[in-house]
Amino acid sequence: MDLTGSFDLPAPRDAVWKALNDPAVLKECLAGCEVFEPDGENAYRCTIAASIGPVKARFNSKVTLSNINAPEGYTLAFDGQGGAAGFGRGESQVTLEE
């Protein structure tokens, strides 16, 4: 699956960059996120509770940032394991423009 999109934020790029690198802000941006904390350099550990139809699961996940070019963007990769509910993987290219 390939999803694309863009958002206009009424804030300076440096402020958005700072927010995108703040674990507390990232936690608030992820629906069902219970834990989002540092786990090494440019890496985070997170737990996300998700419901897909009647199936409810907690995904223990790793989020890593790469190709970091402050304050212009980075690549964000996600790899989560949900036990019997399966797994999820994804990657997003984050680009900030004035």
Image (cartoon, grey):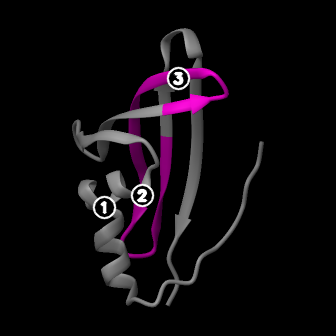
Determine whether label 2 and label 1 are within 8 Å by CB: yes
Instruction: Bin the neighbour count of mark 1 within 10 Å (Cα to Cα): few under 14, some 14-19, many 20 and up.
Output: few
For residue 56, the mark is: 3
Q: Which residue is mark 1?
A: 25
Identify which amino acid the numbered label 1 is placed on. Answer: Val
Q: Which residue is mark 2?
A: 29
Query: In the orientation shown, which residue stands out farthest toward the top?
Result: 84
Q: Could you say whether the residue bearing mark 2 is in a helix, strand or loop?
A: helix
Q: Could you say whether the residue bearing mark 3 is in a helix, strand or loop?
A: strand
For this rendering, which residue is in front, 65 or 83?
83
Determine whether label 2 and label 3 are within 8 Å by CB: no
- Residue 54, given in percent of the width and then of the height, sits at 63, 22
Q: Could you say whether the residue bearing mark 1 is in a helix, strand or loop?
A: helix
Magenta segment boundaries in residue numbering: 50-77
Foreground: disc 3 or disc 1: 3
Residue 36 is inside the magenta segment: no
In the picture, residue 34 is in which quadrant?
Answer: top left
Q: CA distance from mark 2 to mark 1?
A: 6 Å
- Residue 98, given in percent of the width and then of the height, sits at 49, 90
- Residue 72, given in percent of the width and then of the height, sits at 45, 75
Q: Residue at x 42, y 57 (%)?
A: 29
Q: CA distance from mark 3 to mark 1?
A: 25 Å
Q: CA distance from mark 2 to mark 3?
A: 20 Å
Identify which amino acid the numbered label 3 is placed on. Answer: Lys
The prevailing secondary structure element of the residues shown in magenta is strand
